[in-house]
Image (cartoon, coloured by chain):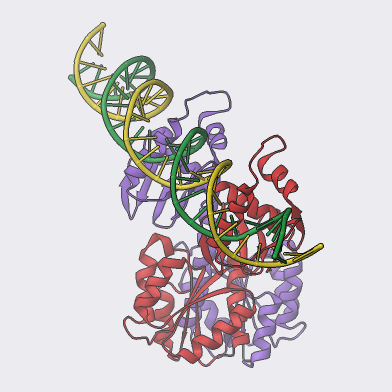
Chain colours: A red, B purple, C yellow, D green
DNA sequence: ATAAAGGGATAACGTTGTGTTAACCTTAAA
DNA sequence: TTTAAGGTTAACACAACGTTATCCCTTTAT
């Protein structure tokens, strides 16, 4: 299955639990966000619009049940998967959890492996929608370049590039490690017939380096540039 | 929710359990079929093509796990909901259950009420998926677009759009995040042959932004527009 | 038929940000 | 050290987009 890139928000007031779950979900390829209380969970949910939210129930500043109720009233989160993960294992709590609109209810303690199974099962059931097939998305390390959405992400932070900058970056990133000659770049990005000055490429390269905030483009003096981490 | 008429097949070798579960599911409006061993479960599944199958694992003449595996290899049952209901509550059994393709794994003993909650939760999750497919209603964040009623809702407030505005918005929202080139927009909304001025799209975009009162349409200079929250 | 209302396109002008260049500075190789 | 190649910066021109008012046309009610 293509679990890559699905966003999961975990809310729990115990840092240890947050860390353990986060580690295991990330190892599986999920992108994980955390919150340490109810209010923060709501806030982060609106920020990142996760595909799945794992909620503790006994949390400060709004219980998981309250968070779930609030989210379910909002159209944006009507279809968001929600799992309760809690020490409350009595029947009435569980039934109430499902009545609130949860998709699963898991008792603590639970092994990370088992939680993963349940998470995967949920995504398997729901997740036929956005299969990444032959779209032109490039993923190099922590950099994601999506030419369809015209978006560049670095460590899950969206970076806004101008047209030429984007095209230039996309060209370089399409073959990481390979050196592109200045002439190649001119032909591919500007076109065979367009004539621009010597410094034009440099300036664009600089802006990309600056905006991405990484040294991902290496200069090969006298030859050209290459994308490399 | 429309639980009525959904078909559930229960397979268990203990007649008492069959009876109790059957009673409770029927009380909720489900149509229930039963099987007392693995082979019978397979046979009845093919007969009635149930929406959900509840499988015991320790059964004569094929275990629940075997039944699940066999069903999942057949296209007809690829999307059939399957719940394991078993006394085997060790971790490895549960993980194996999910690996086999189950949608939930429930330990015996369980109260009928709680089982019902889980069954309902599963149908609720799957039901939405089928709903969304048939009619052309788009739901992106807190924006709901209904092409049948010709209505746009933002935070549950109805917004009235003109025809062209609506078609333009619907096109963009049909693939949130994706950038549509100006030419694509012209072809889709205006038609291949119609020729309109340069500023026409902009003006409609502006009206949409103004009426919706949100910044949900992003301009990608030199490229096009995209719907994004 | 006629008036009223609103949709849709366009022109004219305002605004923004991109792309490019020039001028100067830094670095690395011979 | 020398020097060629690239880095950096700011400034500018212009293309692309935003905004507004206006006109024409279709629709709807009287």
Q: Quick check: B62 left or right of B175?
A: right
Give the residue drawn at x 43%, y 58%: B141
Judging depth in this view, the residue of A64 and B215 nearest the camera is B215
Q: Is residue B196 above or below residue B76?
A: above
Q: Is residue A80 above or below residue B100?
A: above
Give the residue drawn at x 52%, y 23%: B195
Judging depth in this view, the residue of B77 and B150 nearest the camera is B150
Q: Is residue A225 visible?
A: no
Q: Is residue A181 above or below residue D23?
A: below
Q: Position of residue A192 (x, y in %)?
A: 72, 37
Q: Quadrant of the N terminus of chain B?
A: bottom left
Give the residue drawn at x 59%, y 52%: A204
Give the residue drawn at x 63%, y 88%: B14
Q: Is residue A175 above or below residue A119?
A: above
Q: Position of residue B149 (x, y in %)?
A: 40, 41
Q: Quadrant of the C terminus of chain B?
A: bottom left
Q: Position of residue B104 (x, y in %)?
A: 59, 78
Q: Position of residue A34 (x, y in %)?
A: 47, 79
Q: Quick check: B3 left or right of B215?
A: right
Q: Quick check: A145 left or right of D26?
A: right
Q: Quick check: B125 left or right of A91?
A: right
């Amino acid at each position: 299955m293509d679990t890559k890139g699905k966003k999961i928000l975990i809310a729990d007031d115990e840092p240890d639990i947050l860390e353990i779950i986060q580690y295991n979900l990330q190892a599986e390829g999920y992108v994980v966000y955390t919150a340490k209380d109810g209010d923060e969970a709501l806030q982060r949910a609106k920020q990142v619009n996760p595909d799945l939210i794992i909620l503790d129930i006994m949390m400060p500043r709004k219980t998981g049940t309250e968070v779930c109720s609030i989210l379910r009233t909002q159209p944006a989160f009507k279809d968001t998967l929600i799992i309760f993960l809690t020490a409350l294992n009595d029947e009435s709590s569980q039934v109430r959890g499902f009545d609130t609109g949860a998709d699963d209810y898991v008792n603590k303690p639970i092994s990370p492996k088992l939680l993963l199974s349940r998470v995967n099962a949920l995504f398997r059931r729901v997740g036929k929608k956005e299969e990444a097939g032959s779209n032109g998305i490039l993923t190099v390390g922590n950099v994601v370049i999506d030419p369809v959405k015209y978006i560049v992400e670095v460590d899950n932070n969206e970076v806004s590039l101008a047209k030429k900058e984007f095209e230039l970056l996309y060209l370089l990133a399409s073959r990481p490690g390979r050196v592109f000659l200045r002439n190649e770049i001119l032909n591919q990005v500007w076109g065979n017939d367009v004539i621009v000055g010597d410094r034009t490429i440099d300036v664009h390269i600089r802006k990309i380096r600056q905006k991405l905030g990484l040294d991902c483009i290496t200069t090969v003096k006298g030859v050209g540039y290459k994308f490399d981490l």
